[in-house]
Image (cartoon, rainbow, N blue to C red):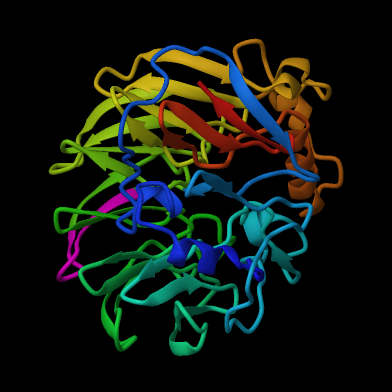
Amino acid sequence: MRRIAIFALLAAAPSTAQNTFRGNNAHTGVYQGAGPKQLGGVKWAFKAGGPIVTSPAIADGVVYFGAMDGHLHAVVLPAEFERKFEAKNLHGYPSAAQTIPDAWDLFTSSPAVANGKVYFGSGDGNVYAADAQTGVLQWKFATGDVVHSSPAVVERTVYIGSWDSHLYAIDAESGQQRWTFKGGEDNTIHNQVGFQSSPAVVDGTVYVGCRDAHVYAIDAATGKKRWDYPTSKSWVIGTPAVRDGTVYVGTSDSSRLMALDARTGRLRFNFDAKSYMFSSPALAGELAYAGDHNGKLYAVDAKTGKLAWEFQTEASKRDPLKVLNADGSLNKQAFAPIFGDFQDMYVDTYRFISIGAIVSSPVVDRGVVYFGSMDGNLYALQ
């Protein structure tokens, strides 16, 4: 995001569990108090002028979010430019010689405010630290590609991933690298590559997903891998939520909400989400809440993985382009190529807009779940 006046607002706001991406600077996805145990209906919905893919933040009773209508209250920090991840022969689309921007690179880096500084990543390939009061640049750290992962800041260390396939640990004061962890590479079609997920840091371990189809647990002090969980070639875009020794995270093509043992990486349960899950789960009370590309928000029992309730957008119920099957899974025939090249990625984006896909990560506050939808609404469910 180029315009981010909400940085100043959030920096000045009293500390709560909702005033930053994923609830806190460790990105645990855990919220104080419980969310709705049963669906009571829509408390209210705010109609923006375009699709919403950003995740809301709450401070002093106000929900802050951005929409694709271009409306954000923001202050420009010292970033050079913004762009999507791009590569030649991306995802195997012709022609092999053409550099293609990735339509699935939906998110930009959300800021973390700590130590009197604002930390964020940029499409120019840098990680920035700016003075929270003045916006004056304190340091910038160069990576090898676009940085759309959101930084986690814990114990004077900034943890952040890049599309260059590396996860970085950076000294929060000096901007010097402490360690780097390398994920998988895909130098042919650049599909199974890059940290689009944002890290979560809990009890000395960094939990993060990767487009190389793995969930990683990495020692926060050394950068050494503790375990990895393979996801059958499915991207892990969302940020893991971690609580009580369990890691919760969604997958894309395999359409799962998984619970993994935080110590061993062993699978505890799989919830069949039916469609791509880019949304990061939020934990509140007994339930895990996560959005899905099929236009549904799921509330899942955090211990058993059983569905407690689900909410479906009206656009998804209407399904004007018939992109869904009756069970909420994707109708593969509706996604047949039209152009036979990278333009089909953008057509698919429109298809998901038509059903109000939920790629926003939910926030839970005082018994209400807040999240955005590609139908342009910010929803509050109670």
Residue at the location (36% across, 50% down)? 16
Q: Nearer the viewer, residue 304 or 47?
A: 47
* Left or right placement of residue 204 versus residue 323 in this view: left
Q: Nearer the viewer, residue 186 or 208?
A: 208
Where does the magenta region start and end? 215-225
Tally of numbered tags: 0
Give the quadrant of residue 251: top left
Residue at the location (35% across, 47% down)? 17
Q: Is residue 329 visible?
A: no
Residue 224 belongs to the span the image colors magenta: yes
Q: Please provide percent x and percent y for residue 300.
A: 38, 21
> Is the residue 362 above or below the residue 25 in the image?
above
Q: Please provide percent x and percent y for residue 230.
A: 33, 43
* Left or right placement of residue 4 versus residue 69 in this view: left
Quadrant showing the N terminus: bottom right
Residue 74 belongs to the span the image colors magenta: no
Q: Please provide percent x and percent y for residue 370.
A: 53, 34
Q: Please provide percent x and percent y for residue 340.
A: 81, 47
Q: Nearer the viewer, residue 246 or 144?
A: 246
Give the quadrant of residue 38: top left
Give the quadrant of residue 226: bottom left
* Left or right placement of residue 338 versus residue 34 in this view: right
Q: Is residue 198 visible?
A: yes
Residue at the location (73% across, 19% down)? 314
Residue lying at the far right in this picture: please name it: 339
Residue at the location (74% across, 52% down)? 68
> Is the residue 176 above or below the residue 363 in the image?
below
Q: Nearer the viewer, residue 210 or 286?
A: 286
